[in-house]
């Protein structure tokens, strides 16, 4: 399989997508995640995202800065039950 990440030119890379990743606030990931996540614990997809970011020398910026909780999630079910 072709390495899509390594194929683009330039020094700045931004990866955007819905990865179903929950990135938690665990101390062991602070250098990559910053620790300001909505979630306490990281799920399997979150671990894969963290491993990818670490392997490529990247960081996960959506969890780097403190924000109000209402700005940390992106979807609410109809009726606000989920």
Image (cartoon, rainbow, N blue to C red):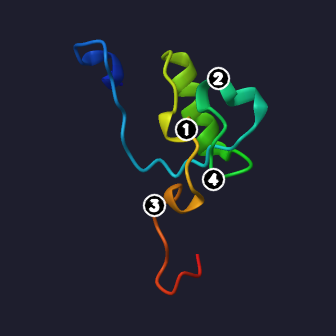
Q: CA distance from mark 2 to mark 3?
A: 24 Å
Q: Earlier in the sequence, mark 3 or mark 1?
A: 1
Q: Which mark is residue 74?
A: 3
Q: Position of residue 12 (x, y in %)?
A: 31, 19
The structure residue drawn at horizontal position 71% and vertical position 41%, both measured from the top left corner, is 25
- Residue 34 visible in the current orientation: yes
Are there few (<14), some (14-19), or many (20+) residues within 10 Å of tag 4?
A: some
> Farthest residue in the left direction?
9
**Where does label 1 land, which residue?**
65
Assign a secondary structure to mark 1: loop
Q: Position of residue 29 (x, y in %)?
A: 69, 29
Are there few (<14), some (14-19), or many (20+) residues within 10 Å of tag 2?
A: few
Callout 2 touching callout 3 (CB < 8 Å): no
In front of the other: 7 or 73: 73
Assign a secondary structure to mark 3: loop
> Farthest residue in the right direction?
27
Q: CA distance from mark 4 to mark 1?
A: 11 Å
- Which quadrant: the N terminus? top left
The structure residue drawn at horizontal position 73% and vertical position 47%, both measured from the top left corner, is 41
Q: Position of residue 62 (x, y in %)?
A: 49, 41
Q: Which mark is residue 31?
A: 2
In front of the other: 44 or 14: 14
**Where does label 4 land, which residue?**
38
Q: Earlier in the sequence, mark 2 or mark 3?
A: 2
The structure residue drawn at horizontal position 76% and vertical position 27%, both measured from the top left corner, is 28
Q: Earlier in the sequence, mark 4 or mark 1?
A: 4
Are there few (<14), some (14-19), or many (20+) residues within 10 Å of tag 1?
A: few
Q: Position of residue 42 (x, y in %)?
A: 69, 44
Disc 4 vs disc 1: which is toward the camera? 1
Are there few (<14), some (14-19), or many (20+) residues within 10 Å of tag 3?
A: few
Assign a secondary structure to mark 2: helix
Q: Earlier in the sequence, mark 4 or mark 3?
A: 4
């Amino acid at each position: 399989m072709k390495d899509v990440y390594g194929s683009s030119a330039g020094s700045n890379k931004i990866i955007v997508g819905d990865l179903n990743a929950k990135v938690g606030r665990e101390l062991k990931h602070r250098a990559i995640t910053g620790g300001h996540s909505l979630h306490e614990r990281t799920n399997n997809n979150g671990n894969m995202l963290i491993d990818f970011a670490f392997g490529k020398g990247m960081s996960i910026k959506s969890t780097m800065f403190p924000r109000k909780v209402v700005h940390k999630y992106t979807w609410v079910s109809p009726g606000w039950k989920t």
